Image (cartoon, helix red, strand yellow):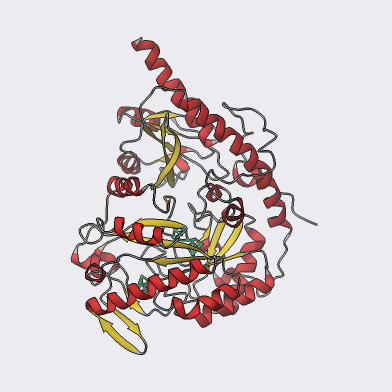
Amino acid sequence: MAQIITLESLLAPAAPPTSSAASGCTASACGSSQAPSGMDPAVWERVKDHPCYAEEAHHYFARMHVAVAPACNIQCNYCNRKYDCANESRPGVVSEKLTPDQAVRKVVAVANAVPQLSVLGVAGPGDAVYDWRHTRETFERVQAAIPDLRLCLSTNGLALPDHVEAIAAMGVDHVTITINFIDPEIGARIHPWIFFNHQRHTGVEAARILHERQMLGLEMLVARGILAKVNSVMIPGINDEHLAEVNRVVTQKGAFLHNIMPLISDPAHGTAFGLFGQRGPTPAELKALQDRLAGGANLMRHCRQCRADAVGLLGEDRGQEFNLDQLPAEAAYDPAARATYRDLVAETRGEHAAHRDAARDDVAAMDAPAVLVAVATRGGGRINEHFGHAKEFQVYEVSPEGIRFTAHRRVEQYCQGGWGEDATLEGVLATLAGIACVLVAKIGDCPRQSLEDAGIAASQDHAYDWIESGIAAWYAQRYRSTVRLTA
Ligand code: CLF
Ligand code: SF4
């Protein structure tokens, strides 16, 4: 018998949702989610359940990576081969490497247990396209077992032109290329060598070959209608200024999305950049660059730089629940839970879209400054996480121009085993610097006071509301009273 699933049981079990902006659901939005303005509805159909390709989708849908591709054909100065591919993951965490057979067992187990699952990605721990034999076999077998799972892969691009036809024939619709440079002089400072055509190349010559292959691969993907995403690692003093040129070129070549990720660099990771003391950008530097690039390719701002074996919604990682030794030896795929969940999301997203539009109209009528609001959420588009349980906050910029997701900020969970840790709270406060207000499902008096002492408002008045509705209501309350006081 099919399991009974509700969105609330999956995402916000503690209280019924309420709304402070629009109420009910408009006829036009009900039961559907519409393409964002300017997006072809046919393209929206291909991205609306991909948590990386559509920001809105990451509230509802999960991805999983299987670490089936250990081999790589280049060296990046931000990578230590002992660890995961840093193009799509945090360095410093070892993945359980899987054979295609083990990967299929894991995908079936996750699909049965995580109804939000919509995408299977191969993102390392080496290069998914260079290690094509493993990636292809995994995809073919998963496709046979779970035909509606979207397939996604990530590559450095060097081997991509050799496999685009096979990728297209398999129906892989989403491919990411990591492109950090256009100018080979800059590329040589990031990628010291490549292995190409049975030969090792170094320096500027290696970077030039890599660049040509990346451009060719991107053009071939776009020509076949595959949605190409470009990831770039932002490395201060090396390619940070140059990324505007990367953005210009990949936009012109038809990239669907550009994801600029901050360099993660730590001597403990044993990477060349970590050992040289190369720093990563600050959140403010990253945001300033992203803001400068608005208008080119769509920018992805919600990347979590996830592991090569990540499982779950982007802000969570349930990979440890599905280690090999925990998997059943054999299990059949049961499509019921995912199908039920999809139907519920389809209905809910229409309601969410209507409330988002109402919230946008509410803030457009305001005369108030742009401020940042941090939201604690467990997914589903709601303010539904307690302050003390949050492992990250989603940051939105609100102004009369609208309400826009800008970034996430990771924190150490404040509440451990029933009580809050003062030392942890200090770190949380530092991470929330520059935030005007934190919206949460619940917060205790003690952390609320500490936040207020640090100049950050905290509110649980919008608990379980839609994120945009709660932000608009807080904004109106905050700035209407200011207007009244100063009038
Ligand atoms: Fe994985 Fe990458 Fe596909 Fe997403 S991740 S292969 S496109 S399914 Fe997503 Fe993770 Fe960022 Fe990658 S949040 S690191 S962008
Ligand atoms: Fe490491 Fe990935 Fe670069 Fe290969 S492509 S060196 S695995 S970061």
Please identify the residue farthest to the right as the structure is shown.
1
Q: Is residue 453 above or below residue 167?
A: above
Residue drawn at x 69%, y 38% is: 30
Quadrant hosting residue 306: bottom left
Q: Is residue 458 left or right of residue 242?
A: right
Is 368 in front, or is 78? 368
Q: Say if residue 11 shows up in the picture.
A: yes
Across and down, in percent, residue 259 comes to: 40, 56
Q: Quadrant of the N terminus?
A: bottom right
Q: Is residue 105 left or right of residue 291?
A: right
Residue drawn at x 28%, y 75% is: 207
Residue drawn at x 31%, y 28% is: 455
Q: Is residue 423 above or below residue 174?
A: above
Q: Say if residue 465 shows up in the picture.
A: no
Quadrant hosting residue 202: bottom left
Please identify the residue farthest to the top as the structure is shown.
487
Q: Is residue 27 left or right of residue 64?
A: right
Q: How many marks?
A: 0
Q: Is residue 236 left or right of residue 38?
A: left
Is 199 in front, or is 144? 199
Q: Is residue 403 above or below residue 476?
A: below
Q: Quadrant of the C terminus?
A: top left
Is 81 in front, or is 287? 287
Across and down, in percent, residue 310 comes to: 49, 62
Across and down, in percent, residue 60 comes to: 58, 49
Residue drawn at x 67%, y 30% is: 24
Is 50 in front, or is 86? 50
Please identify the residue farthest to the bottom as the structure is shown.
198
Across and down, in percent, residue 462 comes to: 52, 29
